[in-house]
Image (spheres, rainbow, N blue to C red):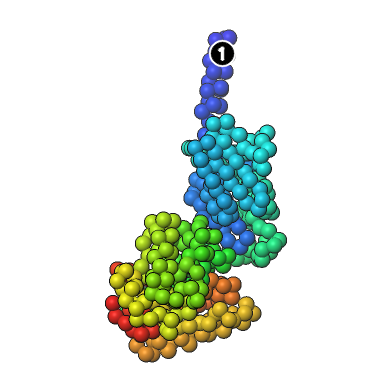
């Protein structure tokens, strides 16, 4: 009888052990999301996990979304944001905040990837972190950056999840190119989010000096499938147009910067303020000899001088300009936009109108170059 009791106990213990969920399965919850201000961030299914009732995310990837400075050495990783530094030492497995060791180590290592609770990372670097149960989302935000209320954000996310019916464009409709100048900046990420919602690819003409301040955002733009064009290093007409050497030099420097950052070789140039009257024949020849192409635009939305309250004017300018180009039998219509707040407000309506009207929206394709400059100069 005692022997039977012994075997019964062994059976219960064994069944209990093997019925426990493994950490990787229990920790992963693909339904949960992370948001920064008004933007839902992109994570793989296994990157947002639930461990000990805490939502954890990859430390380095989340730090890049926060535009934090990241320094990695053989011994440690150091993340700095808003005058707060968070370090993790690989050998000692210690986590320090501003040089002080965290007794309850917040870092969890899973498959050699450093994870950290989103609340700890967010609050340590100056963000408020709220969990929105309705949409299973941890939202990071600050009062100093404009953002929707939680209720407005929930409505927006709920609407975004609804599938968008897109008509097939008629074969005789022109191709439209959405191009954005003067980024990357704080509005670029909002424009990227909108483009992603509508499954649209665009062309971004970044300024080199801005790329140096928004390296992660530049990489994300390329990773999202958009074309990165060249818009000079300085955007300063007094420096850029002083000579052919200066003009080509800025474009080459920026091309090298993008190449080192993304691996992408950019050949498309948009001259600041347009190619006329600043780009001389000598400058065009220099671009052509260097293998570069030059793009201006068909539709100038003048969005740069329209304020937020009047953003509907940008939409109207797009409609008028595109229809005028279509009636002129233009099969490739390039629209000039900028990474500005008023443009971000107008962008969803612009895309919806273009799609409903049957236009195909495409990014620049270097393998199918279309001549698009004010002088209609071929070969460039």
Residue highlighted by disc 1? 6
Query: Left or right of 330: which side holds 86?
Result: right
Q: Nearer the viewer, residue 256 or 21?
A: 256
Residue 149 falls left or right of residue 32: right
Residue drawn at point x = 60 percent, y = 57 percent: 36
Assign the N terminus to one quadrant of the image: top right
* Image location (x, y in percent) of residue 238: 50, 76
Q: Is residue 173 visible?
A: no
Crowding at dot 1, Cα within 10 Å, few <14 / some 14-19 / many 20+, comes out as few
Q: Quadrant of the C terminus?
A: bottom left
Q: Is residue 95 above or below residue 119?
A: above
Answer left or right for 266 relative to 80.
left
- Camera-side residue: 123 or 169? 123
Residue sticking out furthest to the right: 143
Residue 153: x %, y % from top left: 63, 63
Residue 281, image x, y percentages: 34, 81
Residue at 43% across, 60% down: 257
Mark 1 element type: helix
Q: Is residue 10 visible?
A: yes
Give above or below for 81 relative to 204. above
Q: Residue at x 51, y 73 (%)?
A: 236
Residue at 31% in and 73% down: 288
């Amino acid at each position: 009888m005692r022997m039977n009791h012994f075997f019964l106990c062994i059976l219960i213990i064994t069944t209990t052990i093997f019925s426990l969920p493994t950490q990787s399965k229990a920790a992963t919850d693909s339904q949960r999301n992370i948001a920064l201000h008004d933007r839902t961030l992109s994570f793989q299914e296994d990157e947002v996990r639930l461990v000990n009732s805490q939502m954890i995310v990859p430390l380095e990837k989340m730090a890049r979304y926060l535009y934090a400075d990241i320094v990695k050495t053989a011994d440690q990783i150091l993340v700095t944001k808003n005058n707060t530094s968070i370090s993790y030492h690989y050998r000692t497995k210690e986590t320090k905040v501003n040089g002080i060791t965290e007794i309850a180590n917040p870092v969890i290592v899973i498959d050699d990837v450093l994870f950290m609770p989103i609340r700890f990372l967010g609050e340590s670097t100056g963000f408020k972190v709220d969990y929105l149960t309705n949409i299973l989302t941890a939202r990071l935000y600050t009062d100093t950056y404009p953002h929707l209320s939680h209720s407005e954000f929930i409505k927006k996310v709920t609407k975004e999840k609804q599938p968008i019916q897109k008509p097939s464009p008629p074969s005789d409709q022109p191709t439209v190119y959405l191009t954005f100048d003067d980024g990357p900046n704080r509005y670029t990420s909002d424009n990227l989010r909108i483009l992603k919602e509508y499954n649209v690819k665009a062309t971004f003409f970044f300024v080199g000096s801005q790329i140096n301040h928004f390296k992660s955002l530049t990489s994300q733009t390329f990773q999202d499938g958009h074309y990165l064009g060249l818009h000079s290093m300085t955007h300063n007409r007094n420096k850029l147009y002083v000579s052919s050497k200066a003009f080509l030099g800025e474009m080459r420097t920026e091309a090298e910067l993008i190449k080192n950052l993304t691996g992408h070789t950019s050949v498309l140039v948009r001259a600041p303020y347009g190619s006329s009257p600043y780009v001389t024949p000598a400058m065009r020849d220099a671009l052509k000899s260097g293998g570069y192409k030059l793009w201006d635009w068909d539709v100038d939305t003048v969005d740069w001088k329209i304020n937020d309250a009047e953003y509907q004017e940008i939409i109207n300018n797009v409609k008028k300009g595109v229809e005028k180009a279509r009636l002129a039998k233009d099969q490739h219509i390039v629209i000039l936009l900028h990474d500005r707040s008023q443009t971000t407000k107008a962008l969803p309506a612009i895309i919806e109108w273009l799609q409903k009207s049957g236009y195909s929206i495409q990014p620049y394709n270097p393998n199918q170059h279309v001549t698009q400059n004010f002088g209609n100069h071929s070969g460039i």
